[in-house]
Amino acid sequence: MIKILNTTDSLKVVKDNFDNHDRVFFTRFGDCDIIMLSGTDLKGDVLTQAKAWGGNRTIWSKDIQRELKESFTIDHPQYMQGLSCSWETEEGMKNGLFANFKYKERLEQKALQYNKKDVYLSPVLFHYLMCFKNKVFNDFVDQYISGKKILYIGSTPVNHAEKIVGPIAHSVVTPPTNAYYNINEWWTEVEKILKNEDIDVVIPSAGQSSRVISKRIFKMGTKVHSLDLGSIFDIFKKPTRTWLKMKGEELQKIYQ
């Protein structure tokens, strides 16, 4: 059985690694990631290119399946992974707002086929902190992100992302949907920056491609802190995710 650490314990693991190591990654595997790396949906039907998955509307392909699987199966103590399975219901969580949903057990069965690891971090760690423990979230940003030399990779305008994490030194723009489709076009810019600039923190925010970005940078051996903060940057967009429909307006007021 897989155990998902609660947000308090997950944050402690992240902080301990950031404090003690110069090469650290935190990446998150949601339901769409596990489905896509397995190549079948929750009913067992084989995936095709006829359907887009997740908020980034990613189209499944053999290539993204392979790269997601490679990312998920990395076994290294400083390659921390969040995983969508069954987790503790914490204060404020409810349906649509980080509470467990009914098919977590099937995701767990899929995950165990590819990685036998039985402890993961919370995949909604920073989303939850931003919504319900905002000072804790902001303190983390102030200590580990803001003031560092940041590379942001995603589709949110930099001036919006900076409202959350502070000044961004470099950015690589990815498509707002199906970012993996032309990953090798924008990835060359990521590689160029990482090879020529002294980047401290990488923030990938490109849907399923974020997991691929983490894996590729890890394989490069680059000494950075890479932090997959996910859809928190979508607070400035028209909400499509349930949690943003419920909390987005409140968060906009905080970060405007």
Image: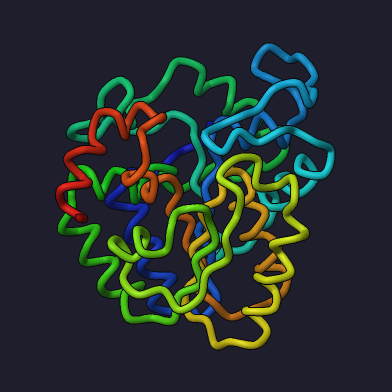
Q: Looking at the picture, how far across and down is residue 98, in whole percent?
A: 33, 31
Q: Looking at the picture, how far across and down is residue 95, in whole percent?
A: 30, 20
Count of labels in the image: 0
Please give the name of the residue rendered at 15% of the width and 58% of the height, measured from the top-left corner: 135
On screen, residue 130 versus residue 224, left or right, reads left
Q: Looking at the picture, how far across and down is residue 131, in whole percent?
A: 22, 43
In-front residue for pair 201/44: 201
Residue 152, above or below 63: below
Q: Looking at the picture, how far across and down is residue 128, in whole percent?
A: 29, 43
Query: Which residue sits furthest right?
Result: 62
On screen, residue 237 versus residue 78, left or right, reads left
Q: How is the image coloured?
A: rainbow
Query: Which quarter of the rendered picture does the C terminus lie within?
Result: bottom left
Please give the name of the residue rendered at 42% of the width and 20% of the height, measured from the top-left corner: 101
In-front residue for pair 76/173: 173
Q: Quadrant of residue 132?
A: top left
On screen, residue 1 versus residue 215, left or right, reads left
Please give the name of the residue rendered at 34% of the width and 51% of the height, measured from the top-left corner: 126
Please give the name of the residue rendered at 36% of the width and 35% of the height, measured from the top-left corner: 238
